[in-house]
Amino acid sequence: MEATAREQVAGRSVEWPTRGLSFGGDYNPEQWAPEVWREDVRLMGEAGVNMVTLGVFAWGLLEPSDEEYAWGWFDEVIGLLAGAGIAIDLATPTAAPPSWLLHQHPEVLLVDEHLVRRAPGSRLGWCPSSPVFRGYALRIAAALAERYGDHPAVRLWHVSNELGGGNARCYCDVSAARFREWLADRYSDVEVVNAAWKTAFWGHRFSSLDEIQPPRGAQHAVNPGLFLDYARFSSHELLEHYLGEAEVIRARSAAPITTNFMVGSGSHVVDYSDWARHVDIVANDHYTLVDDPGRAEDLAFSADRMRGLVDRDSPWLLMEHSTGAPSWQQRNRAKDPGEIARNSLAHVARGADGALFFQWRASLGGAEQFHSAMLPHAGTETRVWQEVVALGRGLERLAVVAGSPVAPARIALLVDEESAWAFEQGLKPHRGLSYARESRVWHTAFWNRQVLVDVLPADAPLTDYSLVVVPSLFISGDARAERITRFVADGGTAVVTYLSGIVDPTNTVIPGGYPGAFRGMLGAWTEEFRPLQIDEEVRLDDDSSVRDWTEDVVLDGAEPVVSHLDGATQGRAAVTRHDYGEGGAWYVSAALASSSVQRIVDRLIAELALPREVEAPPGVEAVRRRTIDGDVLFVINHTSDDVTIATGGLDLISGETSPDATVVPAGRVVAVLEGMRP
Ligand code: GLA
């Protein structure tokens, strides 16, 4: 339980909640009798659990009626955990309001875009702007912090749970009124709103802010400026909720405060690049999706994105993942043997200083009764339990990586929540495109070659990089475009893909040929978009073909790299390259197949001499963490063949040393301590 100081987490000096790496999960003792708590604590010891998230859904049991608290059982659980040396990540239980509160105050329930008030019975069904809900939430947060704020076992605070996962947008009248206040702060005057949103279209001009409604279920498309601002406002309101709870905790406790993000490769409900600055420890929940054939790639993308949300040298925390099948997908997939360790250690390799799960013990009842857990329904005589215990022991042996940075990447890939919102909503040339797909296909091409990519917020500094990948960065204001252009002028290489630089931050088109924001740098521009029909395919001269998206590109200094072989764009460039200043800028105007992206990435790796962590086939993942004892090379073999890597040293996981080369068996992970760099 003893903590170690970690330098600067999210810009602040924070004590990490555990010594070494953190390991454990959500612990929900309220579902069990006290005898079970004792067994839990004993088994936690057996597995090497050193931290649990406690009380995350316990509001209705901690405050069984209005301002009547029941602390006794909680005191006992906290005492048991503390006695066993297990750190507590104490959650405020505000994700799941008690039934009495929703009964007394149905007005706090979320209203959807069709103005239907949601019924109680689940969780996170509350309006983020409701002052009534906020009052009750801050009261229970304050009561908890008052009681346990200086308890030595409380090493971390966990505000609510997955804020926005269920209540990302509320459209009630309270939210509408708050939105108008938010607009008044942002724009000062209604005429500024009219200009920003181009409300002359359809004559939607407002004479007063009072006329503005949220983008509720109108019968047809709504103004793009309005829905983008409503998404920003909604993220802001949830962040305000977080900050409100954090403030009452901070007044009563010195322990760091976090909340669990939901960063996968899909787009997100809130703007995490903004949120990350406000939490003491950046924490994530990650679940693989059964419909995603690239689950390991998705995990790597998400973890690289988490690293981009901290300052890259600071650790972050994997707050939740699963030991097996979740229960919220259509057909929930169990993990294969060895997959728990591959998943957990892939996060650790990419900078997580801990791996926690939802949840410790599988529930017998309640909505998630079939969700996997560290301790399954079948108990300890199970493969899952054995793998959990082995993982716990493995993480203990990896303590040396705690607090260490990931060896630096030379490639930045830019992602932007606001661009995702603007890209995917409203009337568009092609409404079936996925923002996440374009980022993922480029990230995966580097993953296949064991080349590390930092997935960064779109306005992060680029000075440390040789290459910046800009996939469908739909919104590019002047400052953003200038920074990327300067990076290239100063000798960097940029790859800009279709539908980047199309609109400014008000969601208004940048005129003069797409992609307006980058036209000069790219030496190419697009006259007209040519989205392809469902059965259409255009052949390219690199032996691939493209579906979904092409453009009529006009060269203006750039050279064609890949061209269209047929269709209306026959002979026109699909991919171009332009010397600009000291650097080079590529434009990818088509939704390239992954084979085509791989060819470009391989060329960039060769031309820019981008180092591969190891030389291994696709499906073998490799990342280094730079510890005080030397580099630790994590190699994760997702394939069904053993591979040998040309690096020897002590494998911290197995304890075995191999002098020159290391065999990584199929499906296994090694973490080779390479020794100090010269
Ligand atoms: C999310 C939540 C958990 C649990 C898991 C599993 O991550 O935070 O409470 O519901 O999903 O479904």
Image (tube, rainbow, N blue to C red):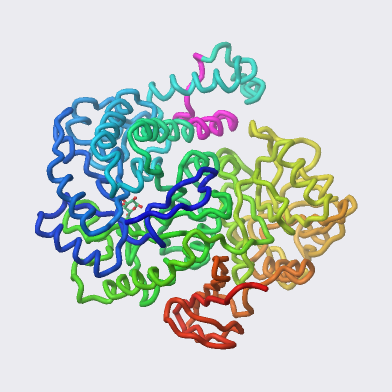
Depth check: give the residue in front, 646 or 13.
Answer: 13
* Residue displayed at 75% across by 45% down: 515
Q: Position of residue 348 (x, y in %)?
A: 47, 64
Q: Position of residue 422 (x, y in %)?
A: 59, 40
With 576 as the anchor, is 195 left or right in this view?
left
Q: Is residue 527 visible?
A: no
Residue occupying the far top of the picture: 207
Q: Quadrant of residue 178?
A: top left
Q: Position of residue 574 (x, y in %)?
A: 77, 59
Q: Quadrant of residue 569?
A: bottom right
The region drawn magenta spans 210-233
Quadrant holding the C terminus: bottom right
* Residue displayed at 78% across by 55% down: 492
- Tell me if residue 216 is in the magenta stretch: yes
Depth check: give the residue in front, 208 or 60.
Answer: 60
Depth check: give the residue in front, 93 or 422.
Answer: 93
In the image, is residue 655 above or below residue 217?
below
Residue occupying the far right of the picture: 557
Q: Position of residue 146 (x, y in %)?
A: 26, 33
- Tell me if residue 486 is in the magenta stretch: no
